[in-house]
Image (cartoon, helix red, strand yellow):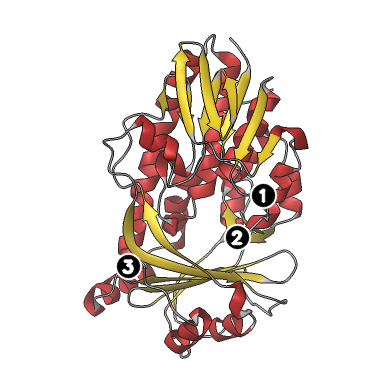
Amino acid sequence: MGNAAVVVGGGIGGLAAAIGLRRVGWEVTVVERASVLGDAGAGISLAANGLRALDELGVGNAVRDASRGQYSGGTRTPQGVWLARMDGRALERAVGTPIMGIPRSTLHRLLRDCLPAESLLIGSTADWVDQPDPGTVRVGCGETVLEANLVVAADGIGSKTRRRLFPAHPGPVYSGSTVLRALTEQAVDLSTDFELTWGHGTEFGHIALHDGRAEWHAVLNLPAGTRFADPLGELRRRLHAWHDPVPALLDATRPTAVLHHDVDELRTPLPSYAVGRIALLGDAAHAMTPHLGQGACQALEDAVTLAAALATEGTVTAALTRYDAERRPRSQTVARAARQAGRMGQQLSHPLAVALRNTAMRLTPSRTATRMILRHHTWIPPQLG
């Protein structure tokens, strides 16, 4: 089979797919609409499954060196009462690594550094994709037309490629939650590596980072499109009475550093992740809520699985059939679990429901909680050689 591929989208999933394809002998062009790869974003947690995928891509050690392990912490009430403790050592014993926290921009840079500059077509938009014959896919980027044997659509939750392939699909919908997040401007004195605090329809969490700074996020039940003139001031108003270090994290943040996005998801599962010689990957295929911290990990799994299938199957069609069969059931199961975790966690707002959940969490043995986490982390990647 031919070995020229175009990856639409230069985010974490798209870059990982390009690295994987190159490792198994494909020539790859990444089309990214941003004119400058500014490495935007706050922080991200990588579980064992995502780290194993990064190992197969050859960048796992570099990512670990730039990350901080999450050994201590857990979930609390706004008054600071512990509902559940994190046992990072138990996770490490079970799967070989703790969850790791890293700035999203650092992960993006490490992935981008694995690709030659000439393979990145920056500031270009994939306006259309078609398949003129059984062996060719074309991508129109303005006046440029790229011909390839495979297109990987990693163009995010608003994927134009997905809309073209599945025009009857309802597309992304609002989850009911909106998220504000930022990195602190300077190092913060934290006693834990990772925490979540659940109020009524509100979550605040932090990730301690390698350089002493922290990423924090606040998830709120609000109507879609809600925005604040002063996002940081609004959070200070809402969370001023919450336990330490919530106020300290907000105080260590520049107002202009706060990012605000509604949380959308693909609630209606796609019937396939592949059509002809086009594969959907990451949020374009299975955008999920962030309540399990698995969005990026699932995209990394996609990238390695796709590369392995193309390396071992005799045709692109056979490889994409295998990719779809392996990735769609697992990623859609994780997406459903993330949605359920949000409904039982951050999104609960009725006082009685919150009290019942909190009691159940306090009574759940730590070993049981660890097993619940591990069911999503124990994925083993196919080898890329």
Quarter-of-image position of residue 284 = top left
- Label placed on residue 65: none
**Helix, strand or loop for disc 1:** helix
Q: Position of residue 263 (x, y in %)?
A: 40, 59
| Mark 3 secondary-structure assignment | loop
Residue in the image at 60% along x and 34% along y: 17
State which quadrant residue 212 falls in.
bottom right
Residue 334 percent across, percent down from the top left: 40, 45
**Pointer 3: residues within 10 angstroms few (<14), some, or many (20+)?**
many
- Classify 308 as above or below 248: above
Q: Is residue 18 visible?
A: yes
* Image quarter in which the N terminus is found: top right
Under mark 3, the amino acid is Gln
Report the front residue among 134 and 375.
134
Quadrant location, the C terminus: top right
Residue underneath mark 1:
108
Secondary structure beneath disc 2?
A: loop
- Indicate left or right for 332 with 234 as reference: left
Left or right, 217 with reference to 56: left
What amino acid is found at the position of numbered circle 1 in the picture? His
Pointer 3 residue: 347
Above or below: residue 337 compared with residue 300: below
For the residues marked 2 and 1, what is the alpha-carbon distance in whole angstroms?
Answer: 10 Å
Q: Are marks 2 and 1 in contact (CB under 8 Å)?
A: yes
